[in-house]
Image (cartoon, helix red, strand yellow):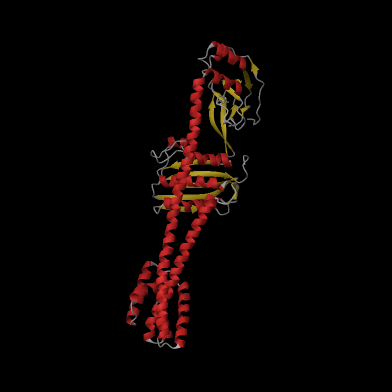
Amino acid sequence: MTDVVKLVPCEPGLLTPTELRTLFLFEKLTEEQLEWIAAHGCTMHMPAGGVVCREGDPADQFYVLLSGTIALTRKVGQDEVQTVRTEQRGVYMGATQSYLRDDGVLRTNQATMRALDDADFFVMSAEDFGFMMREWFPMAIHLLEGLVMGMRSSAAAISERQRLQALGALSAGLMHELNNPAAAASRATAVLRQRVAGMRHKLGKLASGKVPADRLDALVELQEEVIEKASKAPTLTAMQASDREDELGEWMDEHLVTGGWDIAPVFAQAGLDIDCLGDIEAKVGSPELLDQAIHWIGYALETEQLMTDIEDATGRVSSLVNAAKQYSQMDRAAHQWIDVHGGLKSTLVMLTHKIGDGITVVKDFDRSLPQIPAHPAELNQVWTNLIDNAVQAMNGVGTLTIKTYQEDDHVVVSIGDTGPGVPEDLKKRVFEPFFTTKPVGQGTGLGLDISYRIVVNGHGGDIVLKSQPGDTRFLVRLPLTEPSSA
């Protein structure tokens, strides 16, 4: 097949009204109407392999097949996908919406039409076909215009509503995620204030007591040594920590430390053992001072642990804010070269609350992937739709697998779930606008349609569904180079 459009000169007047009546489009028209069509149309012959019209070109001709076989194809990424193959006489293509009022929208061919063998067409210009429809069928045109405009308006309104709902859900999830570390930091700060007050009180008792200056200096030095040792101590399991608490509590009981069983968990959490308590006893030198020294060091350890908790909590808040900025692409160019992993990670953070504890997230990322040209905010919308669908398909329990890899000159992002899968008869419809398998009120049927248009139309890529029970994957293929439409 050739990729060159071969527009064979149109020959007017070769079809009579009687011949036009044999086409199902025109069979109910009057003789006068058929004579008008015959005068304003022409016949065109296209040799086998010729391109009659190309996808994306202005739709300025209306074609009716008279004989031969044609195929319609659409561009998906770098591939040509055949959508229709027919030899049915009377099928039509081209300027099929030229009768709609001029709304400023450039009407283009939605597919490429090729002649698979020698084919003949009856052809009318878009202007003549539009004039004929508006003049002869005004009521039908009003109905069709209402249908088209209504669908556009509905799609726009529902799409906007879906965006707002998604934003609300993400905001609620983000607020929930922010509340946890914020509350933890607040609790730790309140406890820290109590412990610092206790340290001041204990320091006052030490200073007012008859403690030799060298012992007091040794105690302060010992405090720093114990804190440093705690920072390097290995993390204990829950069972090990429990056993350590028992050992430390018994030691403190034997050495008459007041409230030893309350202090033992602090030392155990810090990873300290009986040998450390022995070092404290040896440096303090007196049983009377040991009790106050243990409490003093316990306060110091707990304040360190509380400050670490506050640092972790505020760090978590900072990471959530950064993820939100990354997700929304705040202060960034609309189109840029990106690493797809950044958007995937920020989307997962934003959806943490929705994913829940019952779903295991597996990230199989190829970190060697090159950057790609993209609109990152739009791709984040795609990741949100696909991950959200996967989570809902698993009903809160299963494994969410996100994998990235390179395939030829494309980066591929695979988002898979272990849900029940998509039935075979529905696979072809999942990208249709307004089609949804969710219960009424739980889905608009636009999420996958929007994702498809972002990936295919906006990025020159492709998105396909592979599904069987327990293994459903959406594969998003994005080109490594700037798409021709960019």
- 238 or 203, which is in the foreground? 203
- 76 or 101, which is in the foreground? 101
- Check the image and report above or below for 207 versus 237: below
On the image, the x and y values in percent for residue 30 come to 53, 12
Q: Quadrant of the N terminus?
A: top right
Residue 456 occupies quadrant: top right
- Check the image and report above or below for 438 versus 355: above
Residue 317 can be seen, yes or no: yes
Image mark count: 0
On the image, the x and y values in percent for residue 269 come to 40, 71
Residue 275 occupies quadrant: bottom left
On the image, the x and y values in percent for residue 5 come to 65, 28
Residue 73 occupies quadrant: top right
On the image, the x and y values in percent for residue 58 come to 62, 29
The residue depicted at 44 percent of the width and 56 percent of the height is 177
Q: Is residue 113 left or right of residue 142?
A: right
Q: Quadrant of the C terminus?
A: top right
Residue 234 can be seen, yes or no: no
